[in-house]
Image: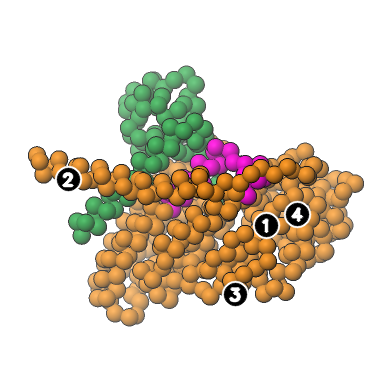
Chain colours: A orange, B green
Amino acid sequence: MSFLWRWTRRLFLAVLLVAVLLALPVLRNETMCRGTPLPQDHEPIVSQTRPEERTFTTYPEWHIVHAYEDYARVIAKADPHDFGYVQAISGFWSSLCPLTALADEHGGFTTESKMTLYTIGISFSAEMALKAAYEETLGRVATWARGPGHSALDRLSAEQAAEYAAFLQQTPWYLWDFRSDAQALDAAAGSDLRDRERRLALGLEYRAKAAYAGMIAGAVAATGQDALTLRAVVAGITPEALAAIPGVKVIQRRPEGIEIETPRYRALTHILERIADQRGQMVEIAGNDDILLTAISPDPDHPGAVFTFPLQGSADFRHLITVKVPELSATLRGLGDSGARLEHIHDY
Amino acid sequence: MARLAAYALAVALGWLALMAGGMFIPGAAPAALVLLPGRDFLTRLPESARLVDASGRFGVTVTGAGARQLYAAGAVLVLPAGLPLCVDPRRDRR
């Protein structure tokens, strides 16, 4: 009985310690990363507006997507223990700090959006901590037994990681078919130790994620979804040229420019690039005059970047850049001159 | 091996504790995922609550009720659900 009590007490203390460690970045963000609301000088032209702070609060979710891209890149050439799990976690919370201050300056957070960020941040940190603990110990030992070359399941899991990272660019994680991945591992596993270890470890991870994803998917489907389009005003381009861009719907002419309706999410980045290429100039997007974009370049510095960090498995850097919406098109056209390439424009 | 399993269990339980604890903050999430609800859970829900999904094997999704009310109705664990995402949620499964 005393043995059971001793271990229960130890487990309770360990859970408490983990909970405190996972909550510390939240505490830091709440106390040390706050901004002062700025007076908003832009009067929206369109009536269908979206909160400006969301351009800053959508990035952290993308940080997780980018971490999976980094992971896929690393394990394509090396092993999972070569991935910087702590770097991925610290990148999330470090980028959230300036973005929180910016969001405070541009309207502030809703409780729901703050809770979303903290929920995904804590969940991502816990997942990375679990993966790190396994891959740095048993996973590493299995690679010693395997030798320098990748096994069949090393190659397959690297392909799966790359496909998953590409999938996340367009689709929520819980829609990925983790069970198919687990079955593919079962089907392709050889008899060597590394393949048996990968099949067991990744199979367990995939099946656990499949079970959780199933519950999340039902809940999200039932609680509805956000608007899928937004309104913007563009100048310096004809309505015909705008209408020729796939996804763009011309609504009306206004004194300030042409009001259009466009899809949100990834498609918006491509549309804004097309408008910039055709010398169009954004006047406002969803009633806002500030927007966040990410760009990749080989330089550790970029003008206007509020946060920069190195990618893993690559020599490049990711820059988080804020621009005034009327300067967006010129900024996009100028990225190439500075050796950078656009990655994503974060809508509201 | 036992130490690794204990560490993994502590991380998983610590994560669950934080997720469940956050649900006590008003307006934390648009819905609640109630894991392992009791047999009479639905009959004990407050009038303001609405069942929005019951397709899961281990839980149901409810809106319009706080964590305190859900535990009082017999929930074993209440987690956040329906949080807004930043990628297009329309795609079908692979």
Extreme residue toward the left, this view: A1
Mark 4 falls on what kind of element?
A: helix
| First in sequence: mark 4 vs mark 2 | 2
Which amino acid is tagged 3?
A: Pro
- Residue type at mark 2: give it: Trp
Mark linked to residue A322:
1
Inspect this view and state whether residue A46 appears: no
Residue type indicated by callout 1: Thr
Q: Residue at x 53, y 68 (%)?
A: A310
- Region rendered in magenta: A102-124
Instruction: Compare marks 3 and 2 and give the one earlier in the sequence.
Output: 2
Kindly check if marks 4 and 2 are in contact, taking CB atoms under 8 A apart as contact.
Answer: no
Task: Identify the chain of the residue marked 1, using the numbered disc in the image.
Answer: A
Q: CA distance from mark 3 to mark 1?
A: 19 Å
Tell me the chain of label 2.
Answer: A
Horizontal side, residue A66 vs residue B78: left or right = right
Quote the CA–CA distance across marks 4 and 2. 58 Å
Q: Quadrant of residue A214?
A: top left
| SS type, badge 3 | loop
Residue at mark 2 = A7
Where is mark 4, residue-wise? A325
Question: To which residue does mark 3 refer?
Answer: A298
Confirm or deny contact between disc 3 and disc 2 (CB under 8 A). Answer: no
Which secondary structure type mostly characterizes the magenta part of the structure?
helix
The chain letter for the residue carrying disc 3 is: A
Residue A144 colored in magenta in the image: no
Name the residue type under label 4. Val
Which is closer to the viewer, label 4 or label 1? 1
| Separation (CA) of disc 4 from disc 3 | 25 Å
